[in-house]
Amino acid sequence: MEFGSTDFPLRPAWVEIDLARLRRNLQLIRADLPSSVRLLAVVKDEAYGHGAVDVARIAIEEGASYLGLSTLEEALTLRAAGITAPMLLLGERQEAELPWCIEYDLTVCVNEATTVRKLARLAAEAGKRVPVHVKVNTGMSRYGVRWDEALPLIELITAEKSLLLEGVMTHFAQSDEADKSFANLQISRFDEVMRGFSSRGRARPLQHLCNSGGFLDLPHAHRDMVRVGILMYGIFPSTVCRRIPGIEPVMSVRARIASIQKLKPGEVVGYGMRYTAASERRIAVLPVGYGDGFPRVRNQGAVLIHGKRAPLVGGIAMDALMVDITDIPEAQMWDEAVIMGRQGAEEITVHDMAKLKNSVSYDVLTSWRLRLRRRCVNGDTQFVRKEAELAEVAVK
């Protein structure tokens, strides 16, 4: 009997990833773009919780030219899985990471002169010419060099023979809202930098500005490449941005009823006795809780059982939540419940979960913890486990 074997009895709660929907979403996105515009698929943070290796492979198969990542570990995990596609490491790199980036052919963002000089020296020592992208801070004020200070840094990069200025980018602070005034200001600042660069007779680098919201609503900013993240996973970044028909959520969260309790009037449910039955009630327990990433709410929200809404009662525990199934008499032990996703004609969306959590859809997708296994359907991979997780078990 082995933990990693296919007959291991998996926990009756899981995150389900529909790979066919992912593939279809990518096809719709690619079809919506002019053929001259490249696609960078953002697969950071385990592909927003969907499983980076499978998502990256499918994205490349469906025409993505680049993969976008945040950490060195994320990139090396994909390289170890045999993925050779170009990878852009977003953010800033500390000096100790630079030799690894060079060895594993990772493209990095360089946003200040010290990093440029260190990377150039290491690349020369390795006998390589390393491609880099410059991020221009056009107003979001996160990573990047200020637009009015960008040209000296770009000139420094082009002067280094061991570096190739492959791309120049920026990031929108607000591209998915109806008011596009600040996004257009950012575009004008970016264009100011590029005009200054081209006036010096330099070769035009790859330009990319758009995230999912920009891709949908700012076609004049598509330029050479767009960086698509949350839309690829079937979630529109806001309620007002343009829709592409056929885009569907890739992730759902499911569990099975692990216990059924019968309450008499006046009896309570859960820690703190936050729910008291006013009449005889039938309560189902699902083995999912805030330890899995479910919002720690009380008497709020619902799940779907037999295509009907079962309201949450009491407080969410670390490993359990309780729902009222009094009006779903057909519900029995080990029946499947949908915590996030569609069942029959009903749906609990990512945005519904975000309201419960008082947060945003990005947070919901990435907050489901890995003890909720990722089960892939409609694709070659049937179940996803992190290599590091299995290795840790093997060591023990």
Image (cartoon, grey):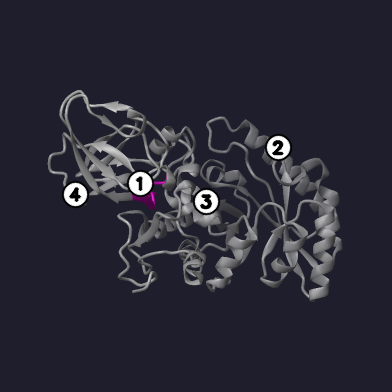
The residue singled out by tag 4 in the image is 333
Q: CA distance from mark 3 to mark 2?
A: 21 Å
Camera-near label (4 vs 3) is 4
Write down the region rendered in magenta.
244-253
Camera-near label (2 vs 1) is 1
The residue singled out by tag 2 in the image is 139
Left or right: where 249 falls relative to 56: left
The residue positioned 85% from the left and 64% from the top of the image is 160
Q: Residues within 10 Å of mark 3 (few under 14, many from 20)?
A: many
Task: Say which quadrant the N terminus sits in.
Answer: bottom left
Q: Nearer the viewer, residue 166 or 312?
A: 312
The residue singled out by tag 3 in the image is 229
Q: Are marks 2 and 1 in contact (CB under 8 Å)?
A: no
Picture disc at residue 18: none
Task: Tell how many labels.
Answer: 4
The percent coordinates of residue 244 (x first, y second) are 42, 46
Mark 4: secondary structure = loop
Q: Amino acid at mark 2?
A: Gly
Q: Is residue 267 above or below residue 370?
A: above
Q: CA distance from mark 4 to mark 3?
A: 38 Å
Mark 1: secondary structure = loop
